Image (tube, rainbow, N blue to C red):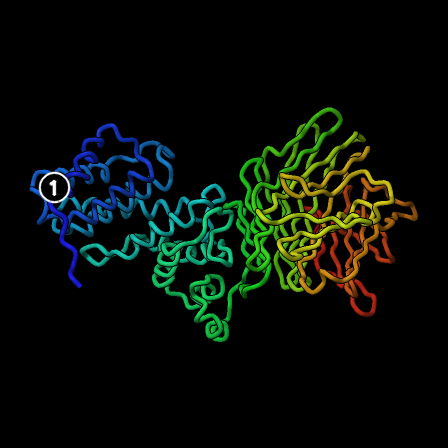
Amino acid sequence: MRASAAPSSADVMRHLEPWLGDDAGRVPDEEFALECLGWSYLLPKLAGVLPPVPWWKTLGVLSDWAARPTGPPNSLPLLVEQLLTGELPWTLADQFPELPHCRALGRSGRRQLSAGVLACVDDTGLPHYRHLDLVRPLLACWTRCRSLVDSAGGICFTAVAQSRYERFVRQALQLSRQNGEPVFSTCRAGPRDAQWMDAALALAGREEDAAIADQLLPWRAASRAASAERVCFPRSSVNSESAQLASLRPAWLRGGEHLVVGHDQGVLRTELSCGSTTVWSGAWSVEVCVGDRRLQPTAWKEVCWHSDDDVDYLELETTWSGSWRLERQILLAREDRFLWLADAVVGPDVQSLEYRSVLPLAGGVEFRPEQQTREGCLMQRRRVARVLPLALPEWRAAAAAGSLDGVPEGLLLRQQARARGLYAPLFIDLSPHRLKWPVTWRQLTVAERLEIQKPDAAVGYRIQVGGDQWLFYRSLTPPASRTLLGQNVLHEFLAARFDTEGEADELLAIDPVGTP
């Protein structure tokens, strides 16, 4: 086959002249930064094509952008800053090591790249939640730079930044769906995703990370079975309070559940996947009306994180004026395969309360309610999960102060009460083989010193799906010695599973902060 002819000087100048002409008034953005990188890679090949003057002018423009001071913190978007002041100077140093000013640019680029990794990625390798949408672009940028070495054989990161980059590679896998897409994404994974991920894995050099990629990424399916047998997989869930990000995953193997939770100020986003199906993705919104005041989260803070062989548990809290607060519980059971989502609204006095929260169902997923009872299934051509609104009566014939409905925004749970607090739990059954089993639940009587407690003091629930049964308890007041269903509890929160002998085996017990 005849090789294509090299571009002529006129062809190149037709594209280069307008680009050089726009340089003075150019506002640096991602597109411009990538154009600079493109020209930096092309310049060596154009040395025999372009006349000297435009060639050197182009190198001068690229060098000027690479050498520009970064300015005040956050003066440029993070990705643009890394591309222009990190990757561009590092690339110029690689392309033109014989030029002293390019070698000097390489040293400044190394400083900027290392600083970017340290600023964006914490010790676990997780990016901060506000940078979550930049995981793949940053991985591509840092991987391109890591693949280059300077004239002395050095790499682009300091030792600490290199260690975080390697952890970041694993967390980029952690923050991926089973179809290869990044979480919270609306774009499909393409060939470039495969190139970046595979190159990063080769540079990170960890066998267990390659095995994780074989499980999660569809383009690596050929080695999936062999790597699963060869490698002892690391812990599959991770949380970082500083990054405001958690990934709850019972196992790395395909087909399981995966819940991602991230928050920044008053916004909390979650994404639930069951195997290759994304069930919901986006902001989990909540509104609480206390009397005539409408309260919305202003900032979330982490209260508790716990992960063991039974469950992953995350608890967050937001507070409002007037001593009202909302405590959000997220529990993913590993072997029992259910998700517990609950909001506890707690205040100082009795008020009229209206609670409303929405889980943003993914496209193609709908909530299909039962006709006679208040549970329903999340469907995408088939049943994906079953949802039980435990604070509401099971049977629709019974009066209820609330509802669970599918609305255009997603899955809407509403509850009302006149009280000093309310508890709004959802039990979401994720086990495929249980979805056809009969289900029932009961709100339990909670007693303290032989006195029945009101729902704004403590609540308890018993759930039965086929032969599987669970017990849940939550105190909305300071914990005390209380009983329900023959069980004595001293905890703030208890999740337990009944064994075949009818004994309650503890899955998780949470005591209030400060309890010894």
User: Can residue 276 be seen by looking at this rendering?
Assistant: yes
Identify the residue under disc 1. 10
Quadrant of res 455: top right
- Position of the N terminus by quadrant: bottom left
| Residue 61 image point, x, y percent | 18, 37
Considering every residue shown, the one lying at the far top of the view is: 292
Quadrant assignment, res 286: top right
Q: Residues within 10 Å of mark 1 (few under 14, many from 20)?
A: few
State left or right for residue 360 relative to residue 446.
left
The amino acid on which the numbered mark 1 sits, given as a three-letter code, is: Ala
In the rendered view, would you say 467 is above or below 454? below
Q: Residue at horizontal 61%, vertical 41%?
A: 284
Q: Position of residue 497 (x, y in %)?
A: 76, 62
Q: Which residue is rendered at x = 81% and y = 54% of the image?
A: 441
What residue is drawn where x is 20% and y is 46%?
40
What is the quadrant of residue 59 in the picture? top left
**Furthest-left residue in view?**
52
Is residue 393 found left or right of 221 in the rendered image?
right
Extreme residue toward the front, this view: 1
Question: How far across and down, in percent of the image, does residue 438 sit?
Answer: 79, 60
- Seen from the viewer's position, the closer of residues 506 and 392 is 392
Residue nearest the viewer, comparing 21 with 513: 21
Asked if residue 492 shows in the view, the reply is: no
Depicted 203 relative to depicted 45: above or below: below
